[in-house]
Amino acid sequence: MKSAGHTSSLFHRAAPVTLILLLLVAAWYVAAYALNAPYQRDLNARQGVTVTTGELVAQTMRQQKPTMPAPHQVAETLWKTTFGVPVTSRRSLVYHAWVTLSSTLLGFVFGTLLGVVIAVGITHVPALDRSFLPWIITSQTIPMLAVAPMIIVILAAVGVTGLIPKALISTYLSFFPVAVGMVKGLRSPEVMHLDLMHSYDASSWQTFWKLRVPASVPYFFTSIKVAIAASLVGAIVGELPTGAVAGIGSKLLAGSYYSQTIDIWAALIAGSVVAMLLVALVDVAGRLTARAMGARPS
Amino acid sequence: MSEKPVISASGLSLVFATHDGPVHALSNINLDIHEGEFVSLIGPSGCGKTTLLRVIADLEQPTAGTITVNGMTPHQARERRAYGYVFQQAALFPWRTIAANVGLPLEVMGLDKAEAQRRVKENIALVNLAGFEKKHPWQLSGGMQQRASIARALAVEPAMLLMDEPFGALDEIVRDHLNEQLLKLWAKTKKTVVFVTHSIPEAVFLSTRIVVMSPRPGRIHEIIDCNLGADRPLEIRETLEFQRIAQQVRDGLRAGHSYDD
Ligand SMILES: Nc1ncnc2c1ncn2[C@@H]1O[C@H](COP(=O)(O)OP(=O)(O)OP(=O)(O)O)[C@@H](O)[C@H]1O
Ligand SMILES: [Mg+2]
């Protein structure tokens, strides 16, 4: 009984997701045909071949450099470059994903630390509260694509290359959600809880560790979920201006350079899969922490 | 009652400056509370009961008059952990177990582990929560949570308990039960209790003195002695003496109220 109920609830949840996925793939095929057909007709006309509509559809699905690659072409490339080559090979998507992932994680750790430090500063030093937040917000309004090359170039001029510059761009993008979320989290305790600590004559250090920090934990996980996705974007953007030879960003760049549209799409999908995995991982960590802290299971 | 009062307020006033002008939360309060007394503050909403309790607890600063707690300023008394404060809501930390919540003030005080453990165990047993030490607040009913918060206040081993409508959010049956328990506790520990309530029967049942307050400005309207003896079963509420005092409180509340209608 119990397991049957469980299976059916799983089915109920999986069904809509599967349906939407199927609809997306179908729409993608239609788009692939629509976008690739003009070039194919042109080509056929120049070569003087006449084809049936069925053949034309088939042709649009197997071009070498399609305007819009069909799902199965992307899937095939994904499969080949993920499982078909050793992970140490430059042709392996796993290798490139790993390169991007390592700078993502480094930048994420930096960004999270920086964000937390800024939040603690803002909540404990009144002067920072007024003077700092506007600057932080301004920092995020500067377009990253414009700043990234400058950071890379300047750092290269002082001899810093490789992982660090890319990670710094991730840091730049990820500290912001953490800072904002943690300011909110550290200020989330109810007045009554603060009064309680005050009635015990608790020091602000004690109030911080025993009340503010635990109260901010849910806010922390919400903000690092955003931060890790931002870090990944930062790492990919950071690979573009460096002319990096490895990483998902470099695959995107190389793909567009040689009009390897299938490679571009494969890299894009690899990037989203990595993003989804990272966000899911943070989500699980958040749930486990909540459970360890005795939260009511939802 | 010749010894020095535990709490002594004279000419105490507190004016809140708000956007719509000053609010006279307390006006010329004169009140002495002696050791071992159970004093209830009763009065309509907004008459300053909470504010008075918070002034005693050094959570609010008076704008005029003087107040001493154990012969000291409320600030000094707070630093010496002279009181345990029980809020209207249990205000337990959701991420702490019941035992850890009760032990919170002891951690803050820097008590050694063994002594803290002893006090936690003892006070949890005192409020009949033995067996729930490892539970988290959401796993307990509202009444049990409030009992845990009382255990937390008692763990400090203060000579004085300040309670702000601790049972206000609970249903009548639970409330009756907790009233009985509180009374037993008071008889056993001889603590001084200042207790805010909206309920006339609760005030009469628990108190040795009832302070009837009235609003705008918040002031003391009348102080009614109420000594029903140390041993009070719930049935005492059916007695004539109980009814007489309750009527006196009711009259006091009505008279205090009629000023502004
Ligand atoms: N922090 C504050 N700032 C401004 N006004 C306040 C503040 N705290 C209380 N007041 C006002 O002071 C008056 C007395 O409030 P208080 O909370 O002491 O009343 P109370 O008797 O406890 O009422 P209740 O029975 O509703 O709890 C009210 O008019 C209230 O609006
Ligand atoms: Mg009140």
Image (cartoon, grey):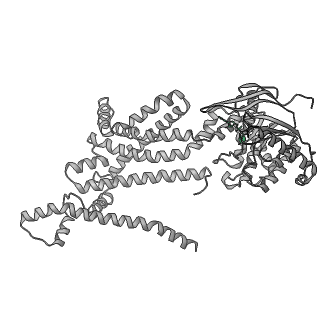
Q: Position of residue B130 (x, y in %)?
A: 77, 53
The reply to whether residue A13 is in sight is yes
Can you tell which quarter of the image residue B47 is in? top right
Is B134 rendered above or below residue A39?
above
B245 vs A170, nearest the viewer:
B245
Is A5 rendered above or below residue A129?
below
Classify residue B151 as left or right of residue A125.
right
B106 vs B65, nearest the viewer:
B65
Q: Quadrant of the C terminus of chain B?
A: top right
Residue furthest to the bottom: A1
Classify residue A273 as left or right of residue A125.
left
Q: Quadrant of the N terminus of chain B?
A: top right
B192 vs A78, nearest the viewer:
B192
Q: Position of residue A7 (x, y in %)?
A: 51, 70
Is A26 rendered above or below residue B257?
below
Q: Position of residue A277 (x, y in %)?
A: 42, 54
